[in-house]
Amino acid sequence: RPTRVTVAAALVALQGLALAAFGLVMLGLLLAGDKPDSVTQAVTGAVTMLVVALLPLGTARGLWRLSRWSRGPAIFLQLLALPVGWQMAGSEGAWFPAGLALAAVAVAVLVCLFHPSAHAVLRVEPGADRDV
């Protein structure tokens, strides 16, 4: 297994775990007595975060197993994470370093997945990235 694909799988899994943790914290705050404006919206938001976490976790599992299909969703997730990280980094407080971290992880995953060793092991056809 190429190191770059292993690193990409680990970083994508980390993103999925962070989303799941965020959803669990949202539920935990609700159960601890935090009174949101709408309990329905709070529960829906938390459950949505938990469900959304399944996408990067499944993609990370695919990368770990060297499944060809997993490269596309992993790249798509990182392209979504870049503007989110940029927006977060433009904020104040704890969101600033979190945004920088998210953007750095997204760039690292993209670099790993566009490396020729990742192409070879994930059976990407030569020149496939240039056809777009």
Image: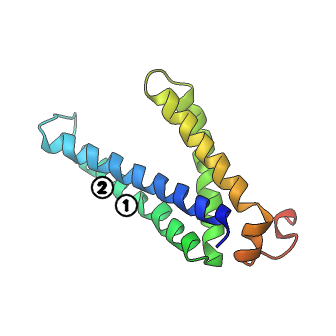
Residue drawn at x 65%, y 68% as measured from the top left: 71
Residue 13's x, y, as percent? 48, 59
Identify the residue position indicated by label 1 in the image: 51
Which residue sits at x=72%, y=68%? 118
Residue flagged by tag 2: what amino acid is it? Val
Tell me the residue at 65%/49% (across/down): 108
Q: Badge 2, how many Cα within 10 Å: few under 14, some, many 20+?
A: some
The residue located at (18%, 42%) in the rendering is 30
Image coordinates for residue 29, horizontal then vertical, percent: 20, 40
Q: Is residue 80 left or right of residue 47?
A: right
Secondary element type, mark 2: helix
Seen from this angle, which residue lies furthest top? Answer: 92
- On screen, residue 35 above or below 82: above
Q: What amino acid type should be assigned to the residue bearing mark 1?
A: Val
Q: Mark 2 — residue?
A: 47
Rate crowding at label 1 as few (under 14), some (14 to 19) or many (20 or more) other CA atoms within 10 Å: some
- With 66 as the anchor, is 40 left or right in this view? left
Residue 4 numbered mark, or none? none
Which quarter of the figure is the N terminus placed in?
bottom right
Pinpoint residue 56: horizontal percent, then vertical percent.
Answer: 49, 61
Res 35 → quadrant: top left
Q: Position of residue 22 (x, y in %)?
A: 35, 46
**Element on which disc 1 rests:** helix
Residues under numbered marks 2 and 1 in contact, where contact means CB atoms less than 8 Å apart: yes
